[in-house]
Amino acid sequence: MKGYLSNLHNIYKVYSEKSSKNIILYNMIFPLWLLWIIPSTWIVILPANFLIDLAVLLITMHCLKISGRKEIVKRSVWKIWVFGFISDFIGTFFMFLVNIIDSFLDYRSPLTEWWYNNLTNAVTYNPLSTPAAFLWTILCILISGSCIFLFNYHFCLRKAVPDRILRKKLALSLAIFTAPYLFLVPTSWFFM
């Protein structure tokens, strides 16, 4: 694993026989928003996310003075936890989408250069470095947060909290407080 991560810093030159031109491919450092996919981090991330989801659920129910909290937690916390990860995966896909789009662009065009400098590179290393990367990252957080809300409202809390208004408030609280704000943390801080 250590050797693999150190290789992420390397730049590889690939010689293209068809075009007779040198093409430089930059091997991407795993961004922070993809680090949790590495299996060794699951040991920390799984219980931490569960505890955060549980805490937000309990605190929100306490603030809303909802009775039967123990039963609601038993019926919904595991679903909330699983669907929270699904929502994070959806947001991660959209974070990574800048790289996918970049791979389809003509590497010689001004648009590709702008896209790489303002989105691909910026989202990957420091989403706070350009307005475009910041907005893209905020959009990805909003997508994940919206998924958290929708999953919790329509699936996770549906049977446990039949009252629509209370269910909506719980789902909104979970969406706001458990959205993946770590998408904004610059990966470049960890590789200096």
Image: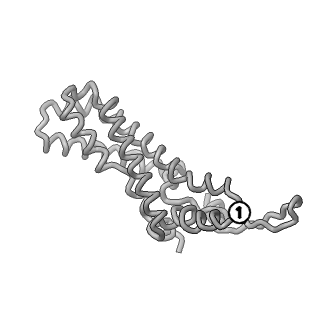
Q: Position of residue 159 (x, y in %)?
A: 27, 24
Which residue in the structure is indicated by mark 1? 107
Quadrant in which the N terminus is drawn: bottom right
Q: Residue furthest bottom?
A: 192
The residue at 26%/43% (across/down) is 172
In percent of width and height, residue 38 lies at 54, 51
Side of 183 relative to 105 (left or right): left
Q: Is residue 21 above or below residue 93?
A: below
Secondary structure of the residue carrying numbered label 1: loop
Which residue is at a point 26% across and 30% down the rendered structure image? 74
Could you say which is closer to the camera, residue 45 or residue 95?
Answer: 95
Residue at image point 47% right, 71% down: 129
Q: Is residue 115 above or below residue 88?
A: below
Say what amino acid the circle numbered 1 marks: Tyr
Q: Residue at x 41, y 45 (%)?
A: 46
Q: Is residue 157 left or right of residue 30?
A: left
Residue furthest to the front in view is 110
- Vertically, is 86 above or below 191? above
Residue 117 location in percent, x, y?
58, 68
Q: Which quarter of the picture shows residue 14? A: bottom right
